[in-house]
Image (tube, coloured by chain):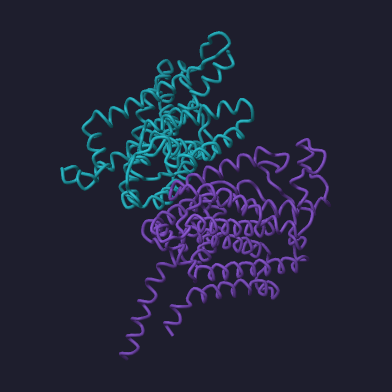
Amino acid sequence: MFKYFEKYGCNLTFSTIVLVLAVMPVLFMLGILSGTSTLLFLGKCIAFAIVAIGLDLIWGYTGILSLGHGLYFALGGYAMAMYLKLQATGGNITDFMHIGGLTELPTIWRPFHTLPITFIMIVLVPSILAWIIGYFIFKTRVKGVYFSIISQALTWAACSIFIALSPYTNGNVGITEIKSIFGSIKGGANQGNLFFLFYMSLATLVGVYAFSRFLVSRKFGKLLVAIRDGENRTYFSGYPVSRYKNFIYVLSAAFAGIAGAIFVNFNGCITPSQMTISYSITMVIWVAVGGRGTIIGAVIGAFLINICEYNLSSGSTVEIWQYIIGAIFCLSILFFKGGLVGLAQEKVPLFMHKLAAKASKA
Amino acid sequence: MDHFVTILFNGVSQSSIILLTSLGLAITFGLMHVINMAHGEFVMIGAYSTYVVQQIFVRYLPESIGSIYYFAAIPAAFLVAFFLGSLLEKFVISRLYGREIDSLLATWGISLILQQAARTIFGTQGVNVTAPAFLQGGFSIGNCTFSYNRLFIILLVVFCMIAIWFIMYKSRFGKQMRAVMQNRPMAMCMGINSRKIDNLTFAIGSGFAGIAGCSIALLGSIDSTVGQSYIVNAFMAVVLGGVGKLIGTVLGSGIIGMASIFTENYTSSTIAKAIVLLIVIIFLQKRPQGLFVIKSRNLD
């Protein structure tokens, strides 16, 4: 029984999380919980968990630390928001374009009239950008911290370009006043829409989790770990390392794009602040605290940190929260390299064996 | 011609600011291989120290000698950043040698804490430092105006460069430092206390960030995120120049500063910054190690 748990612990934990999330809307219908803000927040957490899984694939497994995943997250988010904004305006030119001096809809907005193309763009735009960046950077074998610094600079550059192009993107304000793809989700009358959106997002999370587990549980996953632990040795063994790295980088960018799209639906707006370096590093914090190198760790970290932030970063505790998150991050890097999951993997089997030994003695 | 001289002067000025912020990084990143994301916050600490020194002078000393506060502020900023840097090395960095990426992340956590501490102490509103009387205004030749505070920053950079050169190549400590960075076990065998050298090196790097903060205080208002706006350029300057070579950092910041001012001439400043960063990244495709490479046969 313990062996079973050791083998399938990750999947069991993930199933528990999904079950708890799935029960949430039911609790609302029964009237045990009230106010939709909790559900909106959990929806955002689902998006965060998806981007965290992507980050974990490249950082935890492959050892590429990207400090720029906020860029892909925001690109997916903007793609979704552009479609939703066009829905809200009936396909016409928006207010901020008027202010920016544009008289007709710019060409980059045109593909976002229809939903299927928007869905394609959500995945395609971040992937293509990631592929271009990855192709050039990995080809020259830039690695380790140099990659992190370059990705950070790229994100910064992209963010300032986005803000500067305000007639197209509405600058610092971002795209606001939008509904979700299933219509409005605010208020009691639209609860059905909210539930539907919530379950769709949850299904996406399950899909992303399953796909990632599928990838890392076979030879491909072993190769990623090999690249992390000894890149040159993997080269010498005859594997095209830069192609593997680029593939996993593009995949994680696509995950980030999908996550951004889900995030916009729940958040109701997207701003360039999701694109900043500090937001990108916040995502890394989730993975680091949850536990790098295990898919479940990323999910746990994303939920845990955000739930803490949600409850602590309002009112009088808002100041303390920054200290807490800084300290947690620092301590988990210093002392618990494997994060919470690493700690559990180390301690729980020991504890269980002790328990089993005691039981057999008695 | 006048226009060109003005651009050139702005370029040199911009480069000097970047260089001042990246000097400390060149020491911590280049020599110790510690990625100090909190470096920007040490710049901020230097800027706030300048503000505090000024407030003390305004309150307790007559107005006539008020403007000499700046000369007290520079060593004060250096010492505060030096002391905090030493503490940071002792409690955090010393556990992370050889783990570059982890040092990046841990210092990011520190930078969150420091930023919030600045907000708690000084409030979320930016504070302003009034430049001392002798640095206000400027002189002009023809149609070109050279402002005194920017000239002063250039002088300050030159002074810092000489100081670092002296510390590294002319002092006993510098010799020990280079020995430890080149071959730690052998240096330890020679009786050098490598822990102490590490600590001092990191503290000196942070101290120079403090001086950078002191000069940034002259240029605009100070708030808790002031360091963040300089850190990206500083990192790129170090990487472009080649990690581990101070001359590379000088050249790297010169290129980035000049290029951004020249492109700014044709577009807006944000677009210019983005373009320059892209150019640097493309350049790094050609020479992934930067301009100056330390040759080594090491693999992994």
Residue A209: % across, % down: 57, 68
Name the image quarter holding the N terminus of chain A: bottom left
A309 shown above or below B183? below
Name the image quarter holding the C terminus of chain A: bottom left
Colour that chain A carries in the picture? purple
| Residue at x-position 75% and y-position 37% | A100
Specify whether B265 is left or right of A166: left
Residue B229: % across, % down: 52, 37
B254 shown above or below A293? above
| Residue at x-position 55% and y-position 17% | B6
Query: As rendered, which of B291 and A84 lies closer to the eye?
Result: B291
Specify whether A28 is left or right of B206: right
Query: As rendered, which of A197 and A256 lies closer to the eye?
Result: A256
Query: As rendered, which of A249 and A356 lies closer to the eye?
Result: A249
Residue B282: % across, % down: 53, 39
Rendering quarter of residue A313: bottom right
Q: Which chain comes out cyan in the rendered image?
A: B
Q: Residue furthest top?
A: B142
Specify whether B105 is left or right of B97: right
Q: Residue furthest front?
A: A238
Residue A161: % across, % down: 63, 39
